[in-house]
Amino acid sequence: MMKTKMMLAVMLTAIGCIQMAAQGFRNVSFPEGSYSPVTNINRNGYPRVLSDGSVMFRVQAPQAQQVQIDLGGKKYDMAKGDSGAWMVTTQPQVPGFHYYSLIVDGVSTADPASQSFYGCSRWSSAIEVKETGMDDFEVQQVPHGEVRTVHYYSTVDESWRPLMVYTPAGYNEGKQTYPVVYIQHGGGEDHRGWMEQGRTAQIMDNLIAAGKAVPMIVVSANSNVRSRNGGMGGGYSWQGMQTFRTELLDNVIPFIEKNYRVKKDRKSRAMCGLSMGGGQSFYIGLRSPEVFANVGVFSTGMFGGIQGASNFDLEKEVPGMLTDTKTFNKQLDVFFVSCGEQDPRIEYTRNIVKNMRDGGVEVRFNSYPGDHEWQVWRKSLHEFAQYLFK
């Protein structure tokens, strides 16, 4: 077994070196109209996005017996050419950010030709397919804020844990205080997701510069926290949220309010998140009105569309939502729900929003083209941020 692992490591290292040599030190003829995605290591190499949104992959692995690309859960068999290069062109992809893996002789790994991101509970390659009209997701010639990685001590996990914090342009030079958004990642991701895959800084920089959003701080915590005296918690239930709720309220927020110039009233705090983070925002945000006056729930599966989710009872999960709706509405400045239009969760989400509205709940809702993926979540943040703190 050890010998096999060593051989595999040598083979993957060789693939990486050969890929770079083949792609970076000679002229390569690419299909007309194709482009190198920003996620490529070498902008003069593969993979290439073609004009119809399909993706052409090329992997130099002459000793391999089988090579595949796993893109969005679909496996594509690559064909080997005379030079030892394996190639395949995928089906057209929807615009946005997509994780993928390289499978060499049955072993799944990141592609050395692309940048890697922590997602799907592992380091994965990714490809970015452009979408027209989404300039707010790109770096523009506007004043830029900063993203810092800092560490705080967790009394829950009894360890030092990371946070990624976006501060808007002008924060370092000024003295003003800012409202804060606490933004949560999905399952299989961590605090890096929103700042890297989600392009939070680019979105906020461009919205603030255009006057579409007020300057604000955005804090991304790692919600994969393990309690030393009670496991990790988790699951779509109020009880399952208690470990992270304690972490957020007792550790993360106090750290931010001690170390950053922030406004400390409930109306100046927001909580939002995607998928698992959407469930956390629903339970923790809506059931902590003394802490948060703004809540965003993106693509959560707790309403349905995932295994184990059914018969969601709004009043049971958020007491007072339907029986004391006037008070519930008064406590919230912004309550926003979103989902991808091709996401299995969409119809359940639409139905629960209808139930809320039928009960008098003031909730904003939007859907966007796409499945359970980052382009939907970027658009969700883009919209949510424009409603906040006004």
Image (cartoon, grey):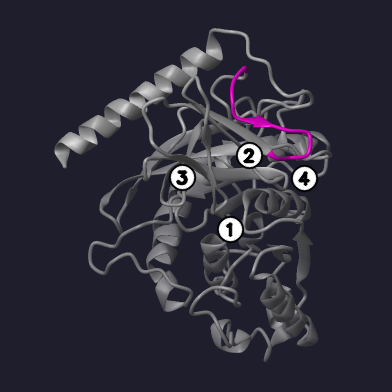
**Left or right: 38 in relation to 387:** left
Front-most of residues 118 and 265: 118
Residue appearing at x 48%, y 53% in the figure: 253
Question: Badge 2: how crowded within 10 Å, few (<14), some, or many (20+)?
Answer: some
**Residue 199, numbered circle:** 2
Check disc 4 and report the residue beneath it: 213
Front-most of residues 327 and 18: 18
Residue appearing at x 23%, y 62% in the figure: 228
| Image quadrant containing the N terminus | top left
**Residue 273, numbered circle:** 1
- Dots 4 and 3: beta carbons under 8 Å? no
Label 2, label 3: how many angstroms apart (C-alpha)?
26 Å
Q: Earlier in the sequence, mark 1 or mark 2?
A: 2
Label 2, label 4: how many angstroms apart (C-alpha)?
16 Å
Check disc 3 and report the residue beneath it: 258
Question: Badge 3: how crowded within 10 Å, few (<14), some, or many (20+)?
Answer: few
- Dots 1 and 3: beta carbons under 8 Å? no
Can residue 94 be seen from the camera position used here? yes
Label 4, label 3: how many angstroms apart (C-alpha)?
24 Å
Part of the protein shown in magenta: 44-54
Amino acid of disc 1? Gly
Label 1, label 2: how many angstroms apart (C-alpha)?
14 Å
Can residue 176 be seen from the camera position used here? no
- The answer to whether 243 is drawn above or below residue 120 in the figure is below
Q: Secondary structure at mark 2?
A: loop
